[in-house]
Image: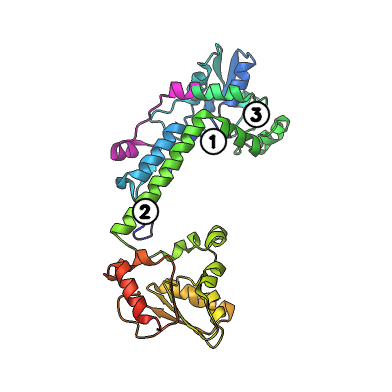
């Protein structure tokens, strides 16, 4: 959120339910309803307590909206149903899918220990979701009645026989719950993949990711910016090294001891260190970067590696003649930053590089 030129949005999500819910929020009550119990007991505090929920497909739509709508940049939005019912009302709505019993509120001190969630129900967990509605036009596409119907159908299809208590339960509740069989992550993943509704949700998420990447590329073309130092982990990680590792790039340069190499847009030195080792102590690597923070990271890395044949220069390639000759010039992931210096990046980079290369 604090990085210049990199738009960000914060979404505060509710208790998300729906097909693929690994917490199985509805199962505790569906199990009792399916057993034919005429009543479900709740403590008086719990019965009147309210908690904002959100159906998974509606939450995905909110995420897509936050990614694709430029007005969302820099905003913090709470997402969830606008009218959360009391917990007794919530359980009753779950029971509308075929249960003819009733929800009974009893004094908290008379509630069986294994049914007590241990929550401080004096404080409701209700989110004001009006901002995302009037600023971005968000609106649920699926009614709560239909959302619960789909979730109940999915829960019954999974055929679970046990229930895992919520993670925030009290130690006494956890002791009483040892007879419950926990849901394995592998089983949750299987149910997640097999759910038709969740498959659609995953497709929405994938589309949102693609649109976010496309938006970032368009923004970079219209308003080029240097790579923020705090995001260097995006290209310094095992995944990037596996496909475009430094060793593979260095081999293509056909380096020899004694050569002079220019590492333009060196960043924190991901390629600088192997370059310096390849040209040996009688060669030299000149690093070019326009950001002081990047060069500071580079200097710390060079000191840790004990490398002395690197000369850092704070500058942007193309903003002024280099006045030096090099045997090799390396430009890795820097063409998009050239326009910051006020020059068309591709042509100016080519001219500057050709002028600095040894014949």
Image-based side of 149 in relation to 8, left or right: right
Q: Earlier in the sequence, mark 2 or mark 3?
A: 3
**Residue at mark 1:** 120
Front residue of this view, candidates 300 and 182: 300
Front residue of this view, candidates 16 and 217: 217
Quarter location, residue 58? top left
Residue 220, x across and y down, in percent: 33, 58
Look at the image and tell me whether residue 327 can be seen.
yes
Distance from Cα at disc 2 to Cα at disc 3: 43 Å
- Tell us which disc is closer to us: 1 or 2: 2
**Residue at mark 2:** 216
Kindly identify which numbered label has been placed on residue 163. 3
Q: Earlier in the sequence, mark 1 or mark 2?
A: 1
> In the displayed structure, would residue 236 be above or below residue 95?
below
At 39% from the left edge and 81% from the top edge, which residue is drawn?
357
> In the displayed structure, would residue 241 be above or below residue 59?
below
């Amino acid at each position: 959120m604090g990085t210049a030129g990199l738009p960000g949005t914060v979404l505060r999500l509710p208790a998300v339910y729906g097909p693929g819910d690994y917490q199985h929020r509805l199962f505790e009550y569906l199990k009792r309803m399916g057993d034919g119990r005429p009543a479900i007991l709740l403590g008086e505090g719990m019965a009147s307590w309210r908690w904002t929920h959100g159906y998974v497909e509606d939450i995905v739509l909110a995420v897509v909206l936050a990614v694709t709508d430029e007005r969302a940049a820099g905003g913090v939005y709470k997402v969830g149903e606008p009218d959360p019912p009391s917990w007794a009302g919530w359980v009753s709505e779950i029971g509308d899918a075929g249960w003819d019993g009733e929800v009974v509120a009893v004094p908290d001190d008379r509630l069986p220990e294994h049914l007590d969630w241990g929550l401080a129900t004096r404080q409701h967990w209700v989110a004001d979701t009006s901002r995302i509605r009037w600023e971005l036009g968000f609106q649920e596409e699926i009614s709560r009645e239909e959302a619960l119907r789909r979730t109940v159908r999915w829960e019954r299809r999974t055929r679970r026989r046990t229930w895992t208590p919520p993670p925030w339960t009290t130690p006494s509740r956890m002791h009483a719950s040892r007879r419950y069989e926990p849901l394995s992550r592998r089983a949750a993943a299987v149910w997640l993949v097999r759910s038709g509704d969740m498959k659609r949700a995953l497709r929405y998420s994938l589309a949102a990711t693609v649109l976010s990447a496309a938006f970032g590329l368009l923004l970079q073309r219209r308003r080029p910016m240097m790579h923020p130092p705090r995001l260097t982990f995006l290209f310094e990680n095992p995944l990037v090294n596996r496909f475009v590792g430094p060793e593979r790039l260095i081999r293509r340069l056909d380096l020899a001891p004694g050569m002079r190499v220019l590492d333009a847009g060196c960043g924190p030195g991901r390629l600088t260190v192997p370059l310096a080792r390849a040209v040996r102590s009688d060669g030299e690597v000149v690093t070019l970067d326009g950001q002081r923070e990047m060069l500071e990271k580079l200097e710390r890395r060079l000191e840790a590696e004990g490398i002395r044949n690197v000369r850092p220069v704070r500058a942007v390639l193309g903003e002024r003649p280099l006045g030096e000759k090099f045997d090799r010039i390396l430009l890795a992931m820097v063409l998009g930053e050239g326009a910051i210096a006020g020059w068309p990046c591709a042509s100016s980079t080519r001219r500057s590089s050709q002028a600095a290369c040894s014949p």
